[in-house]
């Protein structure tokens, strides 16, 4: 059975075709500049590639280009789209409405659209993509929504509420929703397997560190707290995002510089974090190289990010009254031994002991703590597309 996984933005569309018999990716690709011009780059599992500049005024033309790439191009992997059993969509915001993945019905689609108020950059694009799929592939093929927020819906109110007047929660739904939930779920499920334990009996902290970063506390198999909040800006510093900042500092700057709320939003989302502090780049590799070469602001960015990660991990150990396993994932979590070492060294007080040699490994699943470490520490490459495909398969099999 083949599942088509879609991760659509307003001007881009990432996709994978996964064969669920062996969970292997048959092909993956990216459409870019939708609504502007249009380009597709597509790669089959055996290395064949296809790329083209094709007009994509809307997501519908993008999907038509994908169909061509999959079924007719020099990198084709199937004869017809009819071979595909279902489509799984990554949806950024499910609000408090969607505690789990579900079949997309007209009612679900309109709810995803309404939740665009909470994720204006993402949900409207998902809706466009779902409608384009209906247009391109017909109404027969099941489409499944997998929400970044679902995994975090188990948080208790004491963890998801902000201490501001209650009416803003009631009127506008202002609360912590979290993000990266599909990744945290995938990684924590994998940790439970590696630990050889029922996930309902262990305490796990998952650190998803990529361009966006979040940390989640998972107890008895469910999320009890997470660092991202009302939006994916909350938490700790990321590539270009600030994470939590004293709101008074922001209103002070806004007054001084005559900035609108939209300006502040842009500055905190696009000009802050590792980029804002280092002045070098948002990319960890560039910042590490600059720090190595003696750039003090780059070094400060590195130190700040590691310190904030450590504080979140520490606070979640307290929140869960202990921890059995910690996992690192995402581009940075999977590839930055220096960051993992700094964080783990300060966790010696809970019995973390790092295996320095194993910690040097990058981009692969490995336990990086020693055999006598009281807390097991893992690197687990995340695979959100596979998680989406698995949910999609589970729902259509019901
Ligand atoms: P996204 O959140 O966009 O999916 P990724 O998970 O791909 O991002 O993570 C991107 C980050 O991972 C970048 O900061 C990049 O520098 C970092 N990264 C990727 N590969 C390496 C590496 N080999 N060493 C250090 N950092 C890396």
Image (cartoon, grey):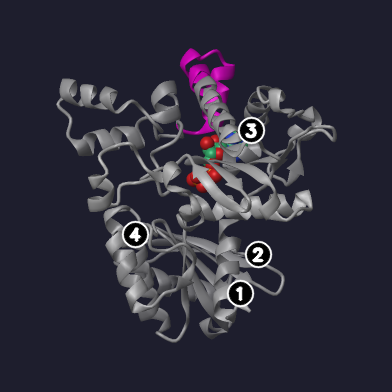
- Pick whichever of labels 2 and 3 is earlier in the sequence: 2
Judged from this view, the residue extending furthest toward the right is 371
Residue 336 - label:
3
Mark 3 to mark 4: distance in Å? 32 Å
Q: Is residue 177 left or right of residue 385?
A: left
Mark 2 to mark 4: distance in Å? 30 Å
**Residues packed near mark 2 inside 10 Å, few (<14), some (14 to 19) or many (20 plus):** some
- Residue at mark 2: C-beta within 8 A of ligand 1: no
Q: Label 2's element?
A: loop
Residue 123 - label:
4
- Rendering coords of residue 24 (x, y %): 68, 66
Residue 45 - label:
2
Q: Find out whether residue 19 is within the magenta segment.
A: no
Q: Do the residues under discs 2 and 1 have CB atoms within 8 angstroms? A: yes
Q: Is residue 337 above or below residue 124?
A: above
| Ligand 1 quadrant assignment | top right
**Residues packed near mark 1 inside 10 Å, few (<14), some (14 to 19) or many (20 plus):** some
- Point out the frontmost of discs 3 and 1: 3
Task: Return the residue nearer the eye: 76 or 234.
Answer: 234
Residue drawn at x 48%, y 49% as measured from the top left: 155
- Point out the frontmost of discs 2 and 3: 3
Task: Return the residue nearer the eye: 376 or 378.
Answer: 376
Q: Specify the segment rendered in magenta.
A: 282-301
- Pick whichever of labels 3 and 4 is earlier in the sequence: 4
Q: Is residue 14 left or right of residue 206?
A: left
- Residue 34 visible, this angle: no
């Amino acid at each position: 059975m083949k599942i088509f996984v879609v991760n659509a933005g307003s001007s881009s569309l990432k996709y994978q075709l996964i064969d669920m018999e062996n969970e292997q990716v048959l092909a993956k690709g990216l459409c870019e500049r939708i609504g502007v011009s249009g380009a597709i780059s597509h790669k089959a599992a055996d290395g064949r590639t296809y790329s083209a500049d094709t007009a994509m005024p809307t997501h519908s033309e993008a999907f038509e280009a994908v169909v061509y790439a999959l079924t007719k191009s020099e990198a084709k992997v199937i004869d017809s789209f009819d071979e595909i059993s279902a489509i799984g969509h990554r949806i950024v915001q499910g609000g408090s409405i969607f505690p789990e993945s579900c079949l997309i019905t007209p009612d679900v689609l309109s709810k995803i659209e309404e939740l665009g108020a909470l994720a204006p950059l993402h949900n409207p694009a998902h809706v466009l993509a779902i409608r384009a799929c209906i247009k391109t592939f017909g109404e027969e093929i099941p489409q499944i929504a997998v929400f970044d927020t679902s995994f975090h819906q188990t948080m208790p109110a004491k963890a998801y509420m902000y201490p501001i007047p209650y009416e803003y929660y009631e009127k506008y739904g202002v609360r912590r929703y979290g993000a990266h939930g599909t990744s945290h779920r995938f990684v924590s499920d994998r940790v439970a397997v590696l630990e050889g334990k029922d996930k309902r009996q262990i305490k796990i902290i998952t650190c998803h560190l990529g361009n966006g970063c979040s940390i989640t506390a998972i107890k008895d198999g469910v999320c009890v707290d997470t660092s991202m909040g009302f939006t994916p800006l909350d938490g700790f510093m990321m590539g270009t995002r600030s994470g939590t900042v004293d709101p008074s500092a922001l209103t002070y700057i806004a007054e001084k510089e005559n900035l609108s709320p939209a300006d502040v939003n842009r500055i905190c989302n696009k000009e802050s974090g590792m980029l804002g502090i280092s002045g070098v780049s948002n990319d960890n590799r560039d910042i590490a190289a600059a720090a190595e070469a003696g750039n003090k602001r780059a070094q400060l960015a590195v130190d700040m990010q590691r310190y904030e990660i450590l504080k979140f991990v520490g606070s979640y150990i307290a929140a869960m009254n202990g921890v059995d396993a910690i996992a690192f994932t995402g581009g940075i979590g999977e590839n930055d031994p220096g960051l993992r070492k700094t964080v783990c060294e300060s966790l010696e007080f809970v019995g973390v002991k790092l295996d320095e040699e194993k910690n040097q490994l990058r981009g692969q699943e490995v336990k990086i703590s020693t055999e006598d470490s009281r807390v097991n520490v893992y690197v687990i490459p995340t695979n959100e597309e596979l998680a989406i495909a698995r949910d999609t398969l589970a729902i259509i099999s019901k």
